[in-house]
Image (cartoon, rainbow, N blue to C red):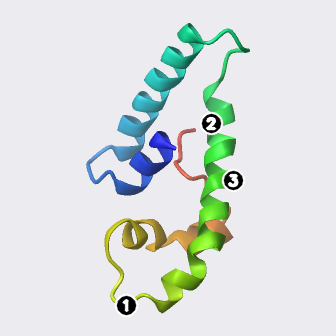
């Protein structure tokens, strides 16, 4: 969730690179402290896409009734429908 929220709210140059580096550090830390199977960035990418779709659907009614859009909702929905319909990844890491 932290990686997802950073991907939505972070406003900086090279956003994808910064979020990918943070995701890598989070995953590496998890892998060092976990006794479960190692997690890989590709798994996070799939999870982020599913989370994006889920939140788009869950918040859509609120989004359509909100005027003006502000905060996280504005950052999340701006251009999101077009990206989802074009099957663009949540963050273009490849």
Judge left or right: residue 25 versus residue 71. right
How many angstroms separate mark 2 from mark 3 (CA)?
Answer: 10 Å
The dot on residue 42 is none
The dot on residue 67 is 1
Q: Is disc 2 surrounded by few (<14), some (14 to 19) or many (20+) residues within 10 Å?
A: some
Q: Secondary structure at mark 1?
A: loop
Q: Residue at x 36, y 81 (%)?
A: 69
Q: Residue at x 69, y 33 (%)?
A: 43
Q: Please report whichever mark, 3 or 1, sits nearer to the chain's N-terminal start.
A: 3
Q: Nearer the viewer, mark 3 or mark 1?
A: 1
Q: Residue at x 60, y 64 (%)?
A: 55
How many angstroms separate mark 3 from mark 1 (CA)?
Answer: 27 Å
Quadrant for residue 36, please give it: top right
Q: Residue at x 32, y 69 (%)?
A: 71
Residue 68 locus on image (x, y percent): 33, 88
Q: Secondary structure at mark 2?
A: helix
Q: Which residue is mark 3?
A: 50
Q: Please report whichever mark, 2 or 3, sits nearer to the chain's N-terminal start.
A: 2
Relative to 40, is 65 above or below?
below
Q: Which residue is mark 2?
A: 44
**Quarter that holds the C terminus:** top right
């Amino acid at each position: 969730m932290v990686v997802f929220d950073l991907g939505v709210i972070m406003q900086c140059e090279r956003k994808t690179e910064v979020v990918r580096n943070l995701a890598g550090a989070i995953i590496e830390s998890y892998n060092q402290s976990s006794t479960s199977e190692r997690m890989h960035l590709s798994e996070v990418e799939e999870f982020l896409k599913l989370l994006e779709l889920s939140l788009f659907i869950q918040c859509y009614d609120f989004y359509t009734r909100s005027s003006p859009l502000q905060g996280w909702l504005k950052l999340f929905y701006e251009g999101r429908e077009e990206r989802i319909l074009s099957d663009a990844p949540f963050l273009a890491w490849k």
